[in-house]
Image (cartoon, rainbow, N blue to C red):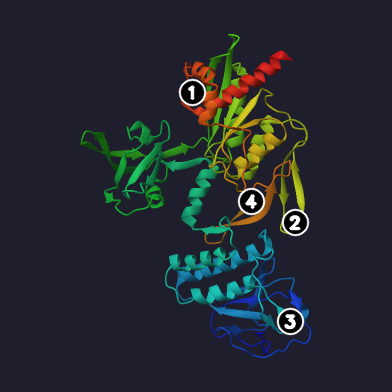
């Protein structure tokens, strides 16, 4: 069995800037052989080194020109022998990421849902103390990062360390990527209102959509237009995130874009336009009222509400929309969560409370120790008690599944569509010192009826299949006469059929 041990001269000085880490004592084995063995080029320092200056957080100590990571759970028997120093990169960009690495490593060690860190175990001991490979990952990654010369290469090493956890949702994103995430969560940005993406077949940047009444929309830019230049700079090989960064900017400034449009029949047009940047409000809620006649001739109004993401404003906008529809005499609802990848879990819980009463359980969380805790409402009051159908599909994930599970398991809604994605994990998001962000899976969740959603998904009560449409073709044919263009959507047609059934049962009672 390999051991790492050092007879440290307490009070020895550090000849060069270094990062230091004290291995926590996990399981002590008495009588283990203790011998020196150089595993990697590291320097060792004593706990009483004069450079120790102050504590900057739980278990984190700062050194002059260094960052020291320590833990309150270490064994006093090893207090002087388990501090390891890592050399600091002389490349400023890499040095910054080294500090970010220690931050990320520490957060994961304290909070990651799997205490075995994807079953990483080690046969290495330090003077008889067993270590786990996740502790050694810091040492290994820091040394691999030392000779690097670019920030991107250093971040790549951090991502490589995180990949060993076997959890794609535990990840680090760059400061620019985190800015984009914040925009999606906050629901506001300063820019021109364009959403762009790289077309996979051609590699061209194309417009996905324009925010309604945004500068881009007012200028006549349309979905499908190819974005050629921004401020005279060609966009060949530029990814969508970089292009988005170029389009954003302080409100009141301008940006010039050049777009290409294929009119058809071999005819193309080019447009160059100067766009003012404005504060763009991104609403996650869109809605309309679908009127149709019941079999008995009565006119029924169905409120259709599409929720595209769970941003900070989602619940408030949803509540305002439902209240407005109630005032217009809506008698039933379709809540569309299809292709909603999730977002803020708290927003999902807040939306659930718009539809539920009392002290219902919304979701159950299971922490790293296997402890389950329900998250429940307290004396809730629903905005409406009208019949509800929720649409889901394979693109409905995370907070969408929490909301769908809460409404279904509490008997509030019928689920229509296709099986959901199956992301039954909750992540915490922490902004790190360099502006990047760390997402860490901190818990699993179960639906109120204790259904495990992770990698399984939620199976709807009713599938919107071609066979089902054919079996009720007379009813659905009648619905297509509705003025709403949404009636061409087969799942909405099935949802309305289910609402009719509920309405008929209610009338009979």
**Dot 4 or dot 3, earlier in sequence:** 3
Which residue lies under the disc numbered 2?
370
Q: Residue at x 67, y 39 (%)?
A: 405
Q: Is residue 209 above or below residue 88?
A: above
Quick check: marks 1 and 4 in contact, CB under 8 Å?
no
**Dot 2 or dot 3, earlier in sequence:** 3
Which residue lies under the disc numbered 3?
78
Measured in 3D between alpha carbons, the distance from the residue under mark 4 to the one under mark 3, in whole angstroms, is 37 Å
Q: Is residue 143 above or below residue 8?
A: above
Question: Which of the numbered marks, if any, corresponds to residue 173?
Answer: none
Which residue lies under the disc numbered 4?
425
Instruction: Please tell me whether mark 1 or mark 3 is closer to you in this view.
Output: 1
Quadrant housing the C terminus: top right
Residue 491 visible within the image? no
**Dot 1 or dot 3, earlier in sequence:** 3
**Dot 1 or dot 2, earlier in sequence:** 2
Measured in 3D between alpha carbons, the distance from the residue under mark 4 to the one under mark 2, in whole angstroms, is 13 Å
Query: In the rendering, at what x and y percent does residue 120 appear?
Result: 64, 69
Quadrant housing the N terminus: bottom right
**For mark 1, does the 10 Å Cα neighbourhood hold few (<14), some (14 to 19), or many (20 or more) residues?**
some
Left or right position of 98 against 499: left
**Dot 4 or dot 2, earlier in sequence:** 2
Residue 57 visible within the image? yes
For label 2, the SS is: loop
Which residue lies under the disc numbered 1?
487
């Amino acid at each position: 069995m390999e051991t790492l041990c050092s007879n440290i001269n307490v009070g020895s000085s550090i000849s060069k800037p270094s990062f230091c880490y004290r291995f926590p004592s996990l399981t002590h084995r008495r009588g283990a052989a203790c011998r020196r063995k150089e595993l990697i080029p590291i320097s060792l320092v004593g706990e009483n080194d004069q450079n120790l200056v102050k504590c900057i957080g739980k278990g984190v100590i700062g050194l002059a020109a260094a960052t020291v990571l320590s833990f309150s759970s270490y064994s006093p028997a090893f207090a002087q022998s388990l501090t390891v120093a890592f050399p600091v990169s002389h490349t400023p960009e890499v040095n910054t990421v080294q500090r970010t690495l220690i931050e990320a490593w520490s957060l994961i060690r304290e909070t990651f849902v799997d205490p075995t860190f994807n079953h990483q175990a080690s046969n290495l001991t330090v003077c008889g103390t067993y270590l786990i490979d996740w502790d050694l990952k810091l040492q290994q990654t820091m040394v691999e990062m030392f000779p690097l010369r670019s920030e991107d290469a250093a971040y790549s090493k951090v991502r490589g360390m995180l990949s060993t956890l076997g959890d794609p949702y535990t990840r680090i994103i760059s400061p620019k990527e985190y800015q984009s995430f914040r925009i999606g969560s906050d629901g506001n940005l300063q820019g021109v209102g364009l959403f762009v993406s790289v077309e996979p077949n051609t590699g061209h940047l194309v417009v996905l959509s324009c925010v309604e009444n945004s500068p881009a929309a007012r200028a006549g830019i349309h979905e499908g237009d190819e974005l050629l230049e921004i401020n005279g700079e060609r966009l060949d090989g530029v990814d969508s995130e970089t292009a988005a960064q170029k389009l954003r900017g302080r409100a009141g400034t301008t940006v010039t874009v050049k777009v290409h449009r294929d009119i058809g029949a071999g005819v193309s047009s080019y447009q160059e336009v100067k766009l003012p940047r404005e504060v763009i409000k991104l609403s996650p809620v869109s809605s309309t009222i679908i009127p149709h006649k019941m079999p008995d001739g009565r006119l029924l109004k169905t409120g259709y509400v599409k929720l595209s993401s769970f941003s900070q404003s989602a619940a408030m906008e949803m509540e305002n929309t439902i209240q407005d529809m109630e005032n217009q005499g809506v008698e039933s609802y379709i809540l569309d969560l299809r292709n909603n990848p999730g977002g803020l879990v708290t927003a999902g819980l807040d939306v659930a409370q718009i539809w539920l009463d009392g002290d219902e359980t919304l979701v159950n969380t299971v922490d790293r120790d296997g402890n389950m805790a329900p998250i429940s409402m307290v004396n809730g009051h629903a905005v409406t008690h009208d019949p509800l159908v929720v649409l889901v599909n394979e693109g409905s994930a995370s907070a969408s599944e929490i909301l769908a599970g809460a409404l279904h398991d509490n008997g509030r809604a019928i689920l229509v569509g296709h099986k959901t994605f199956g992301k039954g994990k909750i992540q915490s998001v922490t902004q790190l010192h360099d502006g990047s962000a760390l997402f860490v899976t901190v818990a699993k969740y179960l639906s109120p009826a204790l259904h495990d959603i992770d990698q399984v998904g939620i199976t709807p009560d009713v599938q919107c299949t071609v066979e089902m449409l054919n079996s009720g073709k007379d009813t659905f044919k009648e619905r297509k006469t509705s003025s709403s263009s949404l009636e061409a959507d087969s799942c909405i047609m099935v949802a309305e059929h289910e609402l009719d059934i509920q309405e008929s049962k209610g009338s009979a009672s």
